[in-house]
Image: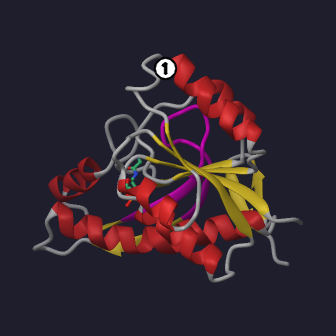
């Protein structure tokens, strides 16, 4: 299989983007990032892309106020660049149904909880970890899943748990969860790039070489 071309969609700091860049640069992921698309103009993730010679594009509410046009622009870039895999790495905007359909089992998202807990509408970023603390669960974690038409409902690729300690704040939990995000996201991308992820219904399995 030839090198896959990856688009990473971001909205914030881009530590997950960085983890993918690092694994590509050290030869662990057999792929390249063709473009980084940010829904926020000032996202630090765009600076990370630039630093590594990766094209970064801002497509957001200011330059594309109409949601439809925003989605069309994103789709056009993905097509122009012949993207094989889309990675939503902290992307906090809405994507079109057509795009989801077109990239079925070729679009993955990282979510900072153990899906199906603390996910769905309204659960993103820090809100997830605040809800975890409030509920009092003893374990949380991160999930990588393929994107379907729902919110955080697609087939689960990989999960990893972390402990929630008695004295933890939402920030402490976020930090611990991010560490495992940086393990399971690049690993999922690597397995995809090697053609080892198989989706049967809701179940994703990893094929041996
Ligand atoms: C990550 O914790 C990611 O799981 C979360 O946003 C953060 C982005 O961090 N995504 C969501 O909440 C999506 N529902 P990063 O910009 O440093 O990668």
Q: Residue at x 74, y 56 (%)?
A: 5
In which of the image's four quarters is ligand 1 placed? Answer: bottom left
Q: Is residue 92 left or right of residue 8?
A: left
Instruction: Where is residue 92? Give x, y as percent.
Output: 40, 41
Q: Name the residue beneath numbered marker 1.
A: 67
What is the crowding at mark 1: few (fewer than 14 residues within 10 Å), some, or many (at least 20)? some
Q: Is residue 3 above or below residue 62?
A: below
Instruction: Where is residue 63? Give x, y as percent.
Output: 44, 26
Q: From the viewer's side, name the closer residue of 164 and 176.
A: 176
Would you say residue 113 is visible in this rendering? no
The N terminus is located in which quarter?
Answer: bottom right
Q: Is residue 60 above or below residue 46?
A: above
Q: Residue at x 53, y 33 (%)?
A: 150
Q: Is residue 28 left or right of residue 140?
A: right
Q: Is residue 177 above or below residue 72?
A: below
The C terminus is located in which quarter?
Answer: bottom right
Q: Residue at x 47, y 23 (%)?
A: 64
Residue 152 in magenta stretch: yes
The yes-or-no answer for disc 1 within 8 Å of ligand 1 is no
The image quadrant that residue 140 belongs to is: bottom left
* Residue numbers of the magenta segment: 141-158
């Amino acid at each position: 299989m030839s090198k896959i071309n990856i688009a990473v969609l971001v909205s914030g700091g881009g530590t997950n983007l960085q983890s993918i860049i690092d694994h590509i640069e050290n030869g662990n992921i057999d792929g390249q990032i063709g473009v980084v698309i940010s829904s926020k103009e000032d996202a630090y993730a765009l600076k990370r892309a630039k630093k590594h010679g990766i094209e970064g594009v801002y497509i957001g509410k200011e330059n594309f106020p109409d949601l439809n046009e925003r989605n069309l622009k994103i789709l056009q870039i993905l097509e122009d660049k012949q993207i094989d895999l889309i990675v939503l790495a902290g992307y906090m905007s809405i994507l079109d149904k057509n795009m989801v359909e077109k990239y079925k089992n070729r679009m993955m998202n990282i979510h900072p909880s153990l899906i199906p807990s603390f996910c769905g509408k309204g659960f993103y970023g820090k809100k997830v970890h605040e809800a975890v603390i409030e509920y009092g669960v003893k374990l949380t974690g991160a999930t990588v899943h393929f994107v379907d038409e729902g919110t955080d409902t697609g087939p689960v690729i990989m999960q990893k748990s972390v402990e929630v300690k008695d004295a933890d704040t939402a920030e402490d939990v976020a930090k611990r969860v991010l560490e495992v995000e940086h393990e399971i996201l690049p690993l999922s991308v690597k397995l995809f790039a090697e053609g080892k992820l198989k989706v049967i219904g809701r179940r994703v399995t990893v094929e041996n070489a």
